[in-house]
Amino acid sequence: MGRSLRSGRVMKSLSPPNKRAGRADTGRRAAAKSSKQPPKKTSVSVRKAKKEVESSSESEEADDHEESSVSSDSESGDSGEEPEHDTRRQPPNQADEDSSDGSDNDEVAKAAPSPLKKSAAGNESSEDSSDGSDDEGHDDGNQNGSKQGFTDENADWLKPKKKASLLDSDDDGDDDDEFDVAAGGDRSSDDEMEVERESRLIDEEMEAEKEEARLELRRTITQNTEVFHLPTAEELEDDEDRVVPPSELRARIEEILSVLADFKNRREAGRSRSEYVERLAADMAELFGYLQELVDYFLSMFGPSECLEFLEASDKSRPLVVRVNTLKARRKDLAAALMKRGVRLDPLAPWSKVGLKIYESTVPIGATPEYLAGHYMLQSAASMCPVMALAPQPGDRVMDMSAAPGGKTSYIAQLMRNKGVVIANDLKPERQKATVANLHRLGVRNVVTCCYDGRKLGSQMRNSFDRILLDAPCSGLGVISRDPSVKIQRTIPDVKRCAHLQKELLVAAIDSLNHKSKKGGGFMVYSTCSVAIAENEEVVNYLLSKRDVKIVETGLDFGKSFASLFLLCYIADLPRRAGKPGFTRFEHKRFHPSLALTRRFYPHVNNMDGFYVAKIQKLSDKHKGEEEKKTAAAEGEKIEDSAQTDADKGSNKYDNKSKKKKGKGGKKRRDNSEDKAAVPEKRPKISAPPTIQVPSKKKSTNAKMTKPRRMRNTGM
């Protein structure tokens, strides 16, 4: 018996080595694959266990058969006869595989020291047996023409493999894993790599953005195509009884603006544009707290969208600006001193060499030692522009007609370097106290203050100054951010009253200006802190019709002339132009084309107070209105004289004819005294406008005057 077992082992060792190595590799790959398979695939393990039992029984039968064959061979060998090969037996390779599987299972079962190792060994043996059975089934399928692959309920995640592919290389296991994942097999989040997780999150974000963009596009199309319905009279009456929230007012304003932008497609049937504009004005007045008439006036000046921007910017505070007094300090030194005190500041703009913009300060700007020493003056950026446009020179005679509280007057003296003379005039003595205090603090020594009515300075100081600055009193519609009371205290009649006063002051200022100045004078600057056209363009246009003057460039187009400065302003997000040009037409009014040379500053455009600046040059002392009246009166007197002489001549001729007729009839002639008495006396000359003589038309008659035709004499 022992001899037969040894001979059986010898025959097993004589089996092909490649076949045994392939079977061992296949077993290892199957074990590794079984460790990676999901836990839910339990039916395969059950089947493999059944196959293991069957294979073990077959291996035992094969061992018994081998023992019997070995014993017979030994007997035949002893007898000297060669064993005959039975062709009916199974192929040797198949027998070897079965015997090898059985022996491997026996060895693994004997070597298992514990139940845990035994179970692991059992799994490996089951894998080998299953692979063997699969290979057998594959061969039988090739012979019998049956279907290839797995047929159990887990076939959706198992990949059928051929026997040849299992023996190719050791890398097939990795490919199987990749195929299982690609086929939809379950993979835990722990196995997901960081790159894959980030990629998946990015894809999800992109999908969400696409969905949001699609919804936004649909919403935009809906908003641009839908019709906005104005509130009815009943709805407006309901709104009067309740407080409409600002969010609702703003939403309605935006809807009306969108309708006005595409009025043809978005308007409601039966509604006119004026109805939308009226509703818009009412909502704006209620939202921002203005009088209705002021909002209507702004809408007539700007478009609906720009009017909304102007109202919003007027509610925002402007940056705090200080002007460095170069009579006592330099801007660099002053900035360093203020920064040491915790002030955060920047230069105002490239066009100003003396301005500083204050962002934040830990100390009061109007109470620092530098302020008390007169190193700087609190002054807005817009109020510096009129003085820059005037450009006073050292040694000039300059007058500031409305000087209080002295900001512009001190800037003029600073540009003149305390040389020449500056007359600071103001109507109210109480306001001049602040002017005198600021001039003393800033170290100004060439200013004379006075209190006169500016409307009378034209006759009292005729042709006395080289340059004049008139910052006229106005309604203050450009500085609403500093004085919100303007919203409810100023009305359109107030604006017209201010315009009337401004016209009188402007004419008086021109009369006080000397156009024959040897220092290149004859210039004046008119400015207001209002955006109303009635106080700006209409006033200047009135002056053009009354005096011999012309509008010149203000010199404030610094952002338009120099490319480097333009680029710097663009980078720093500063205004690239010194305001917008003035109006040349407004509603039905038409102004002089030269008013386009004037400049306007707006809060929503320049981030400055609303301001208007016009520079005017006096050409002569002629008064256009008075000269026209004098010429018209002289022409009227001449016409009256000629008409009177013609009447006298006609009466004398008639008297002479009547005397001749009476002489022929034998009647006595009248005395010369009676003739003289009959002649009418000459009337005193009265100045009157010339009369226009209209030629008299002949009366037309319906009857037609026709001459009879002459008959020709034919000689018959």
Image (cartoon, helix red, strand yellow):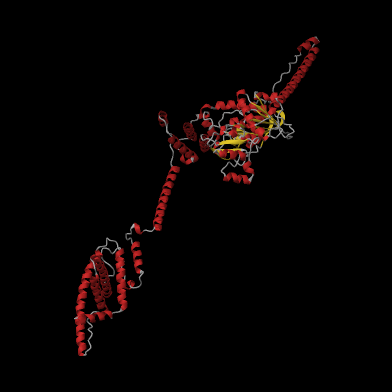
Q: Is residue 124 visible?
A: yes
Quadrant of the rendered image containing residue 588? top right
Q: Position of residue 510 (x, y in %)?
A: 68, 29
Q: Nearer the viewer, residue 102 or 276?
A: 102
Q: Is residue 675 above or below residue 574?
A: above
Q: Position of residue 601 (x, y in %)?
A: 58, 36
Q: Which residue is farthest bottom?
A: 80
Q: How many marks?
A: 0
Q: Quadrant of the C terminus?
A: top right
Q: Position of residue 300 (x, y in %)?
A: 54, 33
Quadrant of the rendered image containing residue 624? top right
Q: Position of residue 359 (x, y in %)?
A: 54, 38
Q: Quadrant of the N terminus?
A: bottom left
Q: Nearer the viewer, residue 107 or 598?
A: 107
Q: Is residue 145 visible?
A: no
Residue drawn at 20 percent across, 73 percent down: 57
* Left or right of 288 in this view: 193: left
Q: Nearer the viewer, residue 196 or 615?
A: 196
* Left or right of 123 in this view: 555: right
Quadrant of the rendered image containing residue 379? top right
Q: Is residue 520 above or below residue 44?
A: above
* Left or right of 471 in this view: 681: right
